[in-house]
């Protein structure tokens, strides 16, 4: 009886938790791109977002080449502007959406024959002006190296985190691979995630 | 205190990127001055993003999102090339701190809202206590301007066929319905007649999608120049 209740509770939570874990994963990849220019992390982001951006763009542009241009332009901005992403301000999905919406807005204006002006960033700014851009960027590089932080985790959590975030294995695959119950994988991920967030300064408000 | 806000529908369209640049800028300027709308916009953006980028069951499969049919249209090679292309450049985009821009009417300087920084500005025209500077957005029948009213000035009673947005950037004015303050977002539809007067003077951002139509007495004579104001 006791066990059953407990089981149900964990189960109900895990659905919500999974979302949060997925969000954190995107967030970590984005930070990894920002801080380490990590191409693997960018490829993960690309694989997640590009097909969705393409699908959305096809509803806005009848021309396939233009829809692809939105993908190219958006993902290129993700690569070049990742350092402007601030995890304290919102989810990675919200940030990428903003980048995509802005690209689309400027392109539509161009196509409608209006103007070659780029107004989107004035209307929906994606950055906070930083006085010492270069210094703070260097600072970040030195302290917030994601991989280094992962290496400080207990071995058992490291395995799970590396498999999940870096190799992009699903939680189910990890359970099989490591021959552990799914619940254990989930709780290790959750623990590791909490630690990573603290270490990467997610919670300094 | 700000009393007039964009409708929920307008905020949604703003977040979706579906409004013309003129109205988008209006909502953005208002939200910069209004915490309530700013929060609502943040929330809406998060929701829309969530909806667009729903997490699918199997992240391992790059193409799981699309139906079989569009799967065939996916430019797989393109995607591989795109990743290589994009990551080949190591430039990061450094965004310089925002510089302030000011604009001057009749010897008064005003800060130009950020949303207007890169719009092409036309020449300023004057008539009595009114000055109008048109923004060149090329949005066909939609006309966007900065309208400056000197103390004691006003716009004669008028209606218009479409909508008319007046966003107060500085100062105050009043019409039959009451007084308006800095930040107020006043959207009128075609049914409303109004006759704004500014005792202290003001600067407004205006968007209208049709010429005004003056309705009273001698003011009817103004109709030929009605396109001047909005
Ligand atoms: Zn408001």
Image: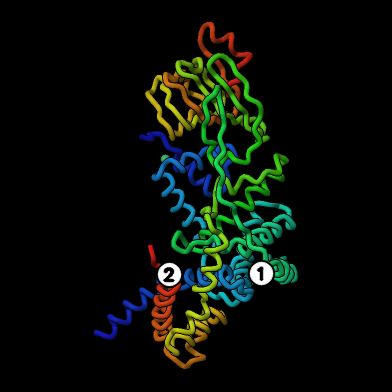
Residue A72 seen in the figure: yes
Q: x, y (%) of residue B3?
A: 37, 34
x then y, percent, for residue A28: 51, 72
The answer to whether residue B73 is left or right of residue A96 is right
Q: Secondary structure at mark 2?
A: loop
The numbered disc on residue A201 is: 2
Q: Residue at x 39, y 65 (%)?
A: A204
Q: Nearer the viewer, mark 2 or mark 1?
A: 2
Residues tagged by mark 2 and mark 1 found on one chain of the structure: no
- Reply above or below: B38 against B83: above
Q: Assign the C terminus of chain B to one quadrant of the image.
A: top right
- Disc 1 target residue: B68
Query: Crowdedness of circle 1 by 10 Å Cα count: few (<14), some, many (20+)?
Result: few
In the image, is residue B192 above or below residue B22?
A: above
Q: Chain of mark 1?
A: B
Q: Is mark 2 within 8 Å of ligand 1?
A: no
């Amino acid at each position: 009886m006791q066990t059953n209740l407990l089981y149900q509770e964990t189960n109900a939570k895990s659905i919500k938790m999974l979302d949060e874990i997925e969000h954190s994963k995107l967030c970590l990849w984005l930070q990894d791109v920002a801080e380490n220019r990590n191409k693997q992390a960018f490829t993960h982001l690309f694989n997640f977002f590009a097909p969705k951006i393409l699908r959305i763009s096809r509803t806005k542009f009848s021309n396939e080449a233009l829809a692809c241009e939105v993908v190219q332009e958006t993902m290129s901005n993700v690569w070049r502007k990742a350092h402007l992403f601030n995890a304290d301000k919102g989810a990675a999905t919200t940030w990428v959406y903003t980048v995509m919406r802005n690209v689309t807005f400027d392109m539509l204006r161009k196509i409608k024959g209006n103007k070659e002006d780029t107004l989107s960033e004035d209307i929906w700014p994606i950055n906070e002006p930083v006085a010492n851009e270069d210094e703070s960027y260097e600072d970040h590089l030195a302290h917030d190296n994601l991989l280094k932080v992962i290496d400080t985790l207990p071995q058992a959590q490291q395995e799970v985190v590396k498999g999940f975030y870096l190799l992009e294995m699903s939680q189910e695959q990890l359970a099989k691979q490591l021959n552990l119950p799914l619940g254990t994988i989930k709780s290790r991920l959750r623990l590791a995630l909490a630690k990573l967030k603290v270490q990467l300064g997610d919670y300094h408000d | 205190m700000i009393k007039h806000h964009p409708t929920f529908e307008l905020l949604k369209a703003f977040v979706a990127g579906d409004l013309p640049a003129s109205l988008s800028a209006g909502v953005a300027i208002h939200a910069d001055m209004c915490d309530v709308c700013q929060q609502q916009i943040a929330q809406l953006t998060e929701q829309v993003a969530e909806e667009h980028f729903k997490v699918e069951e199997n992240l391992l499969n790059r193409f799981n999102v699309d139906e079989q049919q569009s799967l065939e249209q996916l430019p797989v090679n393109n995607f591989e090339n795109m990743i290589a292309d994009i990551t080949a450049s190591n430039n990061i985009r450094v965004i310089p701190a925002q510089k302030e821009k000011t604009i001057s009417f009749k010897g008064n300087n005003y800060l130009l809202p950020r949303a207007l920084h890169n719009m092409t500005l036309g020449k300023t025209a004057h008539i009595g206590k009114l000055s109008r500077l048109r923004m060149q957005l090329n949005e066909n029948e939609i006309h966007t301007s900065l309208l400056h009213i000197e103390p004691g000035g006003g716009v004669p009673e008028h209606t218009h066929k479409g909508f008319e947005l007046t966003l107060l950037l500085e100062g105050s004015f009043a019409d039959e319905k009451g007084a308006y303050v800095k930040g107020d977002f006043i959207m009128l539809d075609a049914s409303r007649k109004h006759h704004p007067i500014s005792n202290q003077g003001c600067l407004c951002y205006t968007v209208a999608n049709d010429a005004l139509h003056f309705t009273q007495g001698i003011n009817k004579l103004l109709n030929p120049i009605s396109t001047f104001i909005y």
